[in-house]
Image (tube, coloured by chain):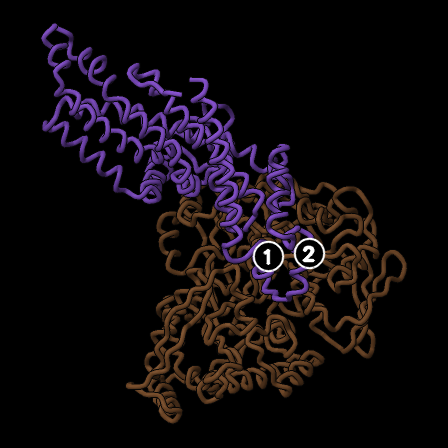
Amino acid sequence: MAGYLIRRLSLMVLTLFGISVIIFVLLRIVPGNIADILFDAAGMVSAAEKHKLETELGLDKPIVVQYVDWIGGLARGDLGYTYVSERPAIEEILPRLPVSAKLAGLALMFAVLFGVPLGVVSAVRQDTALDYVLRVLSLSGLSLPSFWLGLLILMAFVQYLGWIPIYTEKPASLWDELLLLSIPAAAVGFRSSALVMRLTRSSMLEVLRQDYIRTARAKGASELAVNYDHALRNAVLPIITIIGIEAAFLVGGLIVTETVFNIPGVARFLVEAIRWRDYPVVQSLVMFIAVVVVVVNFLVDMAYIALDPRIKYHE
Amino acid sequence: MGRLAVAAAILVPVLMASQGALAQKQGGTLRFYHRDNPPTASIHEEATVSTVNPFMAVFNNLVLFDQTKPGNSLDTIVPDLAQSWSWSDDRKRVTFKLRQGVKWHDGKPFTSKDVGCTFDLLLGKAKDGLRLNPRQVWYHNVANVRLDGDFEVTVELKEPQPSFLALLASGYTPIYPCHASPREMRAKPIGTGPFKFVEFRRNEVVRLARNPDYWKKGRPYLDAIEVRIIPSRSTRILAFVSGEFDMTYDADIPIPLIKDVQSQAPQAICQLRPTGVYVNLLVNREAAPFNDPKLRQAMALAIDRKSFDDILGEGKLGISGAMQPPPEGAWGMPEEMLRTLPGYGQDVAKNLAQARAIMQELGYGPDKPLKLKVATRDIAIYRDPAVILIDQLKKIYIEGELDVVDTTIWHRKVARGDYSVGLNLTGLAVDDPDVNFVENYTCNSERNYNKYCNPEVEQLIAQQSKEADIAKRKAIVWQIERKLAEDVARPVIHFQRAATCWYPKVKRLVLHQNSIYNGARYEDVWLDK
């Protein structure tokens, strides 16, 4: 196991190195840099003046030197300065991380708390009216674009019901903040919950037809025990996998939701940074997301061992 | 736009102002939203109203367009940091007597040195200069700035320029302190204005707080201004109609949405006015076949401005030459004169017949159309008119294909002539020919993207700039307009309009009718909460 872990961790480092190179090169392939954007926005086209700014920002250095500067800084915990606000990138990123983390956490919680039980119910009550309703619900979750759903939710809760304000001020307490975030989190998590629900249903339907389930019923186990202790435990592996993948994909959902609900999180900040070609911010945030994805994948793999004793990772 | 609507547009702010004069209340926070992050907080380094609007209230100018009057003109310029000014007999020197006892927000005294430093920045003479200096061209006529003691400044001009004061009166021309570097001004601006900068958190908020030591006693009335940044239009309008804001961002409500806002917030007051931005056609004059003036003339004749107005602005947009149309615009041609310009006649069928005849003479026709790409920025307000333009060009045997250009490289692409036909938007901060003509139609201006250069027009531009008599100057301006239209310099399609909305509790909010760049001082605004 120790050997496997070492190999796995080495692969993670290699993956992150590959991502760092790809993001660095991709960003420079995209047309325009911050100097182009600033000059274009001002309607100025003087190449000499623009070159002065590029020199000031170090954008005229060879790309390899720029990469080494950045990765060296990253290794020392120095993310560099943002081109736009001219502040250390870490100062811009850190305050925004908790907001997005809370939103993503709530969304994932919503996805699991609704997706798994409703998926089980849907499987157990297969082809009943309840199953049809839940299947329509899950299909709508997969097909409704999140920006549209977000706007509908916003209109309902802000304009008609008046339950929440637009996120314009940091709430006074953590509880207030979680309450305020719960509605946008539901908008983000709805799609994930639909996916989890459908996968739970199909996985459960497969397990419910197994002999050991029939045996459990024959032994006189209660319906609850059969469904959750015997069936769900055996159906859970693909569900864990999809939850892991969804956790990684949540960032994409957060971009739209943070924009529609005006939440000052890190996903919206990333889009803004891409728009400005604010390389230090984009590179740092993409690397952070990459680390999250790699670590979540690793944790999912480890979770397999905990959940299914038959699985062994050989050295 | 009907006469009644125009009269209402002018009367509403005047009535609001007179109503406000009765019993101002001190205190409260004016809350409105912003549509985007200002690139930085430094007005001198930006060319967008996104920076001017939230930060103008931090500063003072030497002189300013009267914030209580709806029109910007030479007659509405009032003293600000300059208590008074006087012109020399040859109209080449203007001397400003500065206000004494004024302090910067960090407590340091304001003196003539600060004015000198500001001009050094604008003229590109400062050692630690501006990263971007988009309005350097405004000051091409400044020969020297002389400081006479701590409280007198004389600006010497190369040629007489009565409109020089209008440039100084713009929201784009605040006075910066000598003791703050451009970098500091981009992040934490220091001014002498009615509000102090508190914070600017990207994607979140710009906060300003009342300056208790403001030199204008009793002002400002507000305790603070809070500007929330909400890029999603649906979200910010929803926030406004649900009462989270006192007003919208200036000119943020497009014509098709005004009815929506008013139906959802019936108590809100919405005022439609010009934004100072005009949509125009760029033709690459140096590339064949567009180097043929006849082809450019045919393209100009194909523009049906009324259709643009009907489709994009429900018939409420402004049709004009290069200067803003009256009644809001101070220099635009009267309608009957405008109709005599090539391509502006109301008989569209006749214009099209003339254009088709030219095209046929050039060898084009239904079986042999001219194929081209219409380049424009990848932004809706650019794309929409470009699509209409392509449709209109079809009628004269020109088959256009939309070529959307990444917004980061648009101006560079146009400046290096890498296009045949382009659809462009041009913004005017000050409704004055010295800004519009000099920036966009003089041979050596950086913003003369299609490199139009006519020595005769150049001479007329210089001539109008020296003319102090408004009637005589207007005559020259209209002569220039005619030349620009005849030369198909940069055919103007229409001027944009948009609305600003606010709740009745916002008092003494006066919107300038011919600029959205010069009226965001907010020192006279108060809240009746």
> How dense is the environment of label 1, judged by Cα within 10 Å: few (below 14), some, or many (20 and up)?
many
Q: Nearer the viewer, residue B86 or B449?
A: B449
**Contact (Cβ within 8 Å) of mark 1 with mark 2:** yes
Residue B339: percent from left, percent from top:
45, 84
* Outermost residue, top side: A219
Figure colour of chain A = purple
Would residue A126 appear left or right of B64 to someone viewing this image? left
Question: Which of B432/B231 is in front?
Answer: B231
Q: Which residue is mark 2?
A: B131
Give the residue at x 87% y 56%: B150
Q: Secondary structure at mark 1?
A: helix
Q: Is residue B308 left or right of residue B288?
A: left
Could you tell me residue A12's position as x and y percent?
A: 47, 31
Secondary structure beneath label 2: loop
Could you tell me the amino acid type at mark 1? Leu
- Point out which mark residue B436 bears: none
Residue located at (57% from left, 64% from top): B515
Front residue of this view, candidates A185 and B171: A185
The chain letter for the residue carrying disc 2 is: B
Which amino acid, mark 2? Arg
Q: Which residue is mark 1?
A: A38
- Relative height, residue B390 to residue A205 (above, below): below
Task: Name the residue at the bottom extreme.
Answer: B361
Find the residue positioned furthest to the right: B149
Q: Colour of chain B?
A: brown
- Tell me, yes or no, if residue B307 can be seen here: yes
